[in-house]
Amino acid sequence: MATGNVCKQVIVEFDGTLMSHFSSVAQFNGFISGLSAMNLAPTVWSSGERPPPFGVTLDFSRLQRAHYRLDGINFADACCWLADSDFEGASLQNAQMGCCPRASFRQARLQGADFTLCDISDCDFTGAELAGTIFTGAVYAVGHEPVGLPTEILALCKPEAMPPPVNPRTPENPREPTGPTVAPLKCSATIHAVPMEQ
């Protein structure tokens, strides 16, 4: 839906209640894979690229999943926002995580979970099982370091306030993503299972 140099975008925003529509991690991951296959999530684009006319965001702020079994769940491909979520005692082995500032992972089983490039500011990892967990490039706001991480793991993470590379086209930052510059039109959405004729 482009007119001249302006692209109008419809963004459908889901909240954490979306999770109750799936009976298994595999079913949720299939939904996320479908969004990615149709280029509907995440709603960002690189400089010089045409913005997508339609997108989906998953705002799972304050998601309550303490003691849930979520092994292998994919919160990363749709850039799920998990701020202030509660995963205390949950099993998230081999999960792909989204940005989760202030989330609780106390006593969680995080073996093999991937926090690559996630915001982990003020997260609580006290007592979490971290064997094989990936924190490469994870970031935190200065003065808001996560608690409960061993020193060697925290060393893999970066304070967000670090200066950007001198050359913005370096391999560390090949293209800067762009997002909406004005407040997007938001609407509710419902999911319906519609039988298809064969």
Image (spheres, rainbow, N blue to C red):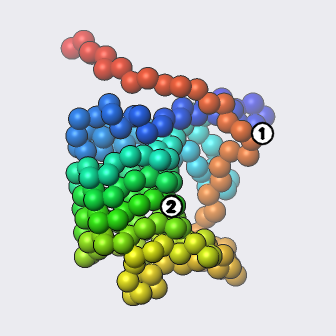
At x 25% / y 64%, what residue is drawn? 109
| Viewport quadrant of the C terminus | top left
- Quick one: label 2 or label 1, which is nearer the N terminus? 1
Q: Nearer the viewer, residue 17 or 124?
A: 124
| Viewport quadrant of the N terminus | top right
Instruction: Identify the amino acid type marked 1.
Output: Asn
Residue 101 visible in the shown view: yes
Instruction: Identify the amino acid type marked 2.
Output: Arg
At x 63% / y 43%, what residue is drawn? 51
Which of label 2 and label 1 is nearer to you? Answer: 2
Residue 115 in percent (x, y) is at 40, 66
The residue that mark 2 highlights is 102
Q: Using a 10 Å C-alpha cutoff, classify the residue at mark 2 as few (fewer than 14 neighbours), some (14 to 19) or many (20 or more).
A: many
Residue 34 visible in the shown view: no
Q: Which mark is residue 171?
A: none
Residue 104 in percent (x, y) is at 41, 61
Residue farthest to the right? 4
Left or right of 166? Residue 132 is left
Q: Using a 10 Å C-alpha cutoff, classify the residue at mark 1 as few (fewer than 14 neighbours), some (14 to 19) or many (20 or more).
A: few
Q: Nearer the viewer, residue 82 or 1?
A: 82
Label 2 – label 1 distance at C-alpha: 38 Å
Q: Secondary structure at mark 1?
A: loop
Q: Which mark is residue 5?
A: 1
Left or right of 54? Residue 37 is left
